[in-house]
Image: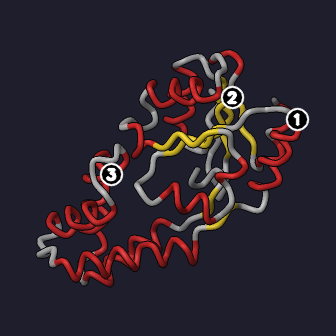
Amino acid sequence: MYETLLAYDFAAHSGALAAAADVDLAAWQEAQVTVLPEHDRGLLSLEGTITRILELCGVRPAPELVAELSRTDQELMAATCRPYDDAVPFLREVRSRGFKVALVSNCGDTTRSRLSALKLADLADALVLSCEIGVSKPSPEIYLRALEALAVTSSEAVMVDDQISYCAGAEGVGVRAIQVTRNGQRPDPRFTSVSTLADVVPLL
């Protein structure tokens, strides 16, 4: 969903949290990468993720600091994470044409409530969130779970994503992938690529 449906500045987010924790940004970002697999598989809550990041940065994860950083994280998400201008029109258009939609994301335990707050959950037939099912893209299982949720076969499905590895993961289970290239991202010649979600509709 992020950078496909939702615009979000991860670098600015990391910078704000590192500053709030009084931690070097490079160290914070390295710790984020380390804990990301556990976070995405739902093994760590938001508070648990922040606790682990602080520990990896050599900072004692005092409960009040963890709580403050958790609040800051959610405030940043609420203030800056927004659907791209083409996201809602695209979802409405494909559903009006009779297509089923599953939102498939590598994410943490606050994502379902965020999607509800943004009214995106209402525009999908299923939410397949890595933190809830214990597997993340590009694992085959997450795509298979999405197919199961929509009751379609892989040959009937299309995966739209910005990440090359996630597109490759979809095609690995027989799902056609379309890469959305935003913010100057380079298209991968292995996949059909589009610059806006509106350009996806004629390809379905």
Q: Secondary structure at mark 1?
A: loop
Please state which of the two labelled residues, at mark 1 or mark 2, is closer to the viewer: 1
- Check the image and report above or below for 129 versus 77: above
- Check the image and report above or below for 45 versus 127: below
Label 1, residues with CA under 10 Å away: few <14, some 14-19, many ≥20: few
Total marks shown come to 3
Q: Which residue is mark 2?
A: 158
Counting residues from the start of the chain, the first of labels 1 and 2 encountered is: 1
- The answer to whether residue 139 is left or right of residue 101 is left
Counting residues from the start of the chain, the first of labels 1 and 3 encountered is: 3
Q: Which residue is mark 1?
A: 97
- The answer to whether residue 25 is left or right of residue 101 is left
Q: Residue at x 21, y 66 (%)?
A: 51
The residue lying toward the viewer, choosing from 56 and 133, is 133
Q: Residue at x 32, y 83 (%)?
A: 19
* Residue at mark 2 to residue at mark 3: CA–CA distance: 26 Å
Corner quadrant of residue 155 = top right
* Residue at mark 1 to residue at mark 2: CA–CA distance: 15 Å
Cβ–Cβ below 8 Å for labels 2 and 3?
no
Q: Amino acid at mark 1?
A: Arg
Q: Position of residue 191 (x, y in %)?
A: 66, 29
Counting residues from the start of the chain, the first of labels 2 and 3 encountered is: 3
Q: Amino acid at mark 2?
A: Val
Q: Position of residue 189 (x, y in %)?
A: 65, 30
Q: Which residue is mark 3?
A: 39
Cβ–Cβ below 8 Å for labels 1 and 2?
no
Q: Residue at x 52, y 20 (%)?
A: 172
Q: Amino acid at mark 3?
A: His
Question: From the image, which quarter does the C terminus lie in?
Answer: top right
Cβ–Cβ below 8 Å for labels 1 and 3?
no
Q: Position of residue 1 (x, y in %)?
A: 58, 50
